[in-house]
Amino acid sequence: MPINDNKESSSVPLLNGLASPDVTERTYGKAIRRLLPFLTGCFVLAYLDRFNIGFAQLQLATDLHISNTAYGFGAGIFFLGYLLFEVPSNIVLARVGARRWISRIMILWGIVSLATAFVHSAFELYIARFFLGAAEAGFFPGVVFYLTLWFPRSRRAHAIALLTTAIAVSGIISGPISGFILQHLSNSAGLHGWQWLFLLEGAPSVLAGIATLYILEDRVADASWLTNEEKTLIGEAVIRESHSKKAMATASIFRDPYIWQLGLINCCLCMGLYGIGFWLPQLLQKAGAGNALHIGLWSVIPYLVAIPFMVWLAWCSNASSKQHRLLIFCTICESIGLTVSALYGESLPIAIIALTLATVGILTAVPLFWMLPTSYLKDGPSAAAGIALVNSIGAIAGFSSPFLVGAIRDATHTTTASMLMIAAMVALGGVVIALLSPGPVSELEHKAG
């Protein structure tokens, strides 16, 4: 049910044909308060259901008799389903509207997450993870595309940064909650702790999917909580920006070299993101963090530190319009953090510091990176397809990162080589950012300036 928090006058005073700064700030403040808390909460649920297998593995590996390689394959096969359905899902979202499509995505992935509690073998785990990825396909790029309909480029980095704090928030709450469930609910009602983990963290996604139908609007024009003048203010800003973007047919997205460059960068960044997301509990266990609950509590620190940096760097990005330079800085931070963790990770204090630096680097890179494709592409189906393609290329890393880490760990009986491999991939992403085609980068910075 729409919330109408609009108590002030319905008229927007104009200065030289434009809304005054105070009115503009008030209008976008409304949009942020209305959309971002709910969408961020949905993202928290998405990352809980995507990464909770990292904590479940502390017990699941023994119960299902699976190796590190098998676990890595099970964690990563999520992204094969994601990859296959990502672009089609986002194209459909652009045509039918975000409200119904995002609701469908959330309800379906919640159901699959619940069903994962009842797998009995590694093969069944693979099936569940594949369908979880297929169900969630289109969610992240769909929401990013949705934000382009509400926030022009000058405000989008802040909005995306607030949205992607969900990655850090999910890390903060998933550690203690997952650790508590594993530690205290094992063998309750005849279920293992990891089964309770999937049940208790999957059900909220179904409920949030239903709530989406009542909270989101497909278009600015449908927002009853904005006055007509406020709708015009937002709508005209987005339209003005769309006229300056690159318009292209949907099919031509696949032939655009800049989109493929962005996809390669996203792939390298995702190697780091998923390397940490799926293996952080095991890295802390190696460092001597203690039992499942203690591991969960220690895992809060990297994500807690990352949140203010995400918001601050997004603000710097809005102010300076130098996303690619800030992105390079973030990749350097993560590469150093992962390298130190790999070489000296058996000491808990050093592991915490290094993993915190790596987590801050990768999580601050995410909102900065997504400014590039959303600023480059014109709104509409082509933008939805382009964003989804970039995200799909990143999904390749989602499969390969946990699988390679598991395979290398089984082969070497240590995490050192696998973490160094991920650090090298992140560094490669920084190099590609530095070598981005100068035309689109210069054009984007000129527009932002």
Image (cartoon, grey):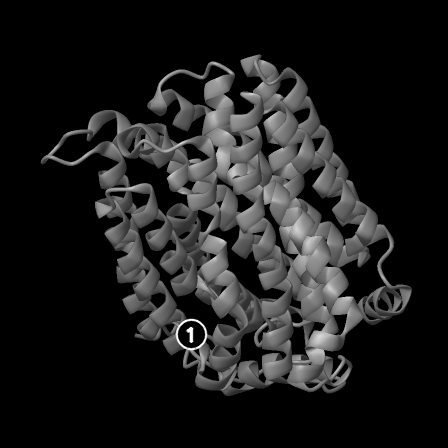
* Crowd band around label 1 with a 10 angstrom C-alpha radius: few (<14), some (14–19), many (20+): few
**Percent x, y of residue 60:** 31, 33
- Image quadrant of residue 358? top right
* Location of residue 106 with respect to 424 vertically, above or below: below
**Residue placed under numbered mark 1 in the picture:** 7
Say above or below: 406 vs 349. Answer: below
Q: Residue at x 80, y 59 (%)?
A: 321
Towards the viewer: 441 or 393: 393
The location of residue 206, given as percent across then percent down, is 28, 61
Establish if 298 lies above or below 141: above
Residue drawn at (69%, 87%) of the image: 249
Number of callouts:
1
For badge 1, the amino acid type reads Lys
Quadrant housing the C terminus? bottom right
**Taking the image as drawn, is residue 30 in sight?**
no
Q: Residue at x 76, y 37 (%)?
A: 332
Badge 1 marks a residue whose secondary structure is loop
The one of 230 and 134 positioned closer to us in this rendering = 134
Q: Position of residue 337 (x, y in %)?
A: 68, 29
Q: Is residue 242 visible?
A: yes
For the N terminus, the quadrant is bottom left
Q: Is residue 108 above or below residue 187?
A: below
